[in-house]
Image (spheres, rainbow, N blue to C red):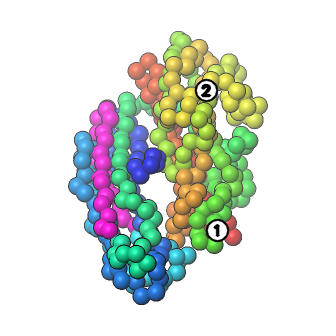
Amino acid sequence: MEAGNNFTYQFAIDDGGSLNVSLPIKFCLTGSTPESDPTWESVTYTFGSPAGNLNGVTVPDSVRFTKEFDGDPASHNCKIANIAITTGVLYEGNYVGSSNISVSSPDVGSGKDKVKVSLNPPKAPNIHYRVIVGEVDDSDNTNCYMTDSSGLLLADCAGNPVEASGSDNGRFAIVTNKRGTGVATNPGQFYYNVTWVNTTESEQTVDVDFVRYGVIPKGAQAIHAAVFSPPFSGLTQAGFDEVNDEIPGGSADHIGGIVVPDGWILWVNYHLEWVGLGSIVYNSTTNVCEDADPYGEGFSITATVTYDGMTESCEAGAWGYLKK
C-alpha cells in the first residue's frame, strides 16, 4: 500500500502463527543529465535500523549506483534489496515496524553544468510493515475470489475462469510503453470478492478488514457490501451488480457494522487497480503467462471477517505478465 513516499506492507495471520517473508524494495537509476561525461560518482540508498514492536526484522546492506551504467534510460538499471521478516510465534494483537531509507545527493555542479541523476523512486522511501494477528478459526464459511470489473471471474492461462476460493491462478496482461513503464492492464481493473455465511444460529454484526499487496483502491467508494437471503447461488453478475448498488464502505480497507441475519450470506467486494501503473516494470517480469508465478507482477488481498469475537480470513490474488 502506497501513500505519498510511504510504502506499507500488511499481513494477517492466525494467533500462534509466525511470519517469514522477504519484502523486495526496487531502486532504479534511469539516466543522468547531461549524459555526456557526467561528473557525478555515485548515489547510495541506506537503510536505517528497524523500529517498532515487530521483532525479527533484518534490513539489507546499502544500495549503491555509480556512473558506469550504459547511459540508456530505457534499460532501467535497477537493483532489488530485500527486508527480511522472521518473527517466530506471534500472539493476538497488532505488530508494527518501519525502516527509513536515506539517499545521498547525486546533484553536483551548478548552473548549466549541473548534473542531475534520475532515480526511481525519486526520493528515499519510508517502508512500514504491519502484522495483524487474530484468533484462529477453522471455519470454511468465508470464501474469496478475484473478478474483473464486470463481475466475471479472472481466467487462468488456458482461459478458464478460476472458480476455487482463495486462488491466485488468475492472470492479467501488463501493457508497457517504450520506456518500460506500465500504462495499462487487461483486464483494466479488478474486484476482490469475499463472502461469509452466518451459521452461528443468531444475528451477527460483522466487520471486514482488508490487507492489500500490489493493488490500490479504485474510487472513493471502492468497497461495497450486500446481504443475501438463502439459498445463495454463488457469484453471479446479477449478484455482483447488486453488491455495487448496496452498502458503500469507502476505500480505507475497512467496512463495518453490517447486520447479517442467521443463515444469510454477506458479500463484500473491493474495487482495485494494479499499483504498477505509471512505474517501471521489473526487468525480471515474464512475457509468458504460464511463467507469471513467480516471475511476474503479483498482487494479493486478504479479508478478515470479524463477528462476536471470532475472525475468519481468506486471501486471493493474481499474477501479471508482459503483453507481447
- Disc 1 target residue: 177
Marks 1 and 2, Cα distance to the nearest angstrom? Answer: 35 Å
Q: Please identify the quarter of the rendering in which residue 234 is found.
A: top right
Foreground pick, 190 / 235: 190
Q: Residues within 10 Å of mark 1 (few under 14, many from 20)?
A: few
The x, y position of residue 246, in whole percent, is 67, 24
The x, y position of residue 165, in whole percent, is 59, 41
- For residue 177: magenta? no
Point 54% across, 65% down: residue: 281
Quadrant of the rendering where the C terminus is positioned: bottom right
Point 25% across, 43% down: residue: 52
**Magenta span:** 80-105
Between marks 1 and 2 in the image, the one whose residue lies nearer the viewer: 1
Q: Is the magenta stretch mostly helix, strand or loop?
A: strand
Q: Can residue 278 be seen in this view?
A: yes
- For residue 99: magenta? yes
119 to the left or right of 153: left
Say which mark, if any, is on residue 248: 2
Point 39% across, 60% down: residue: 123
Q: Is mark 1 on a helix, strand or loop?
A: loop
Point 38% across, 56% down: residue: 125
Foreground pick, 29 / 239: 29
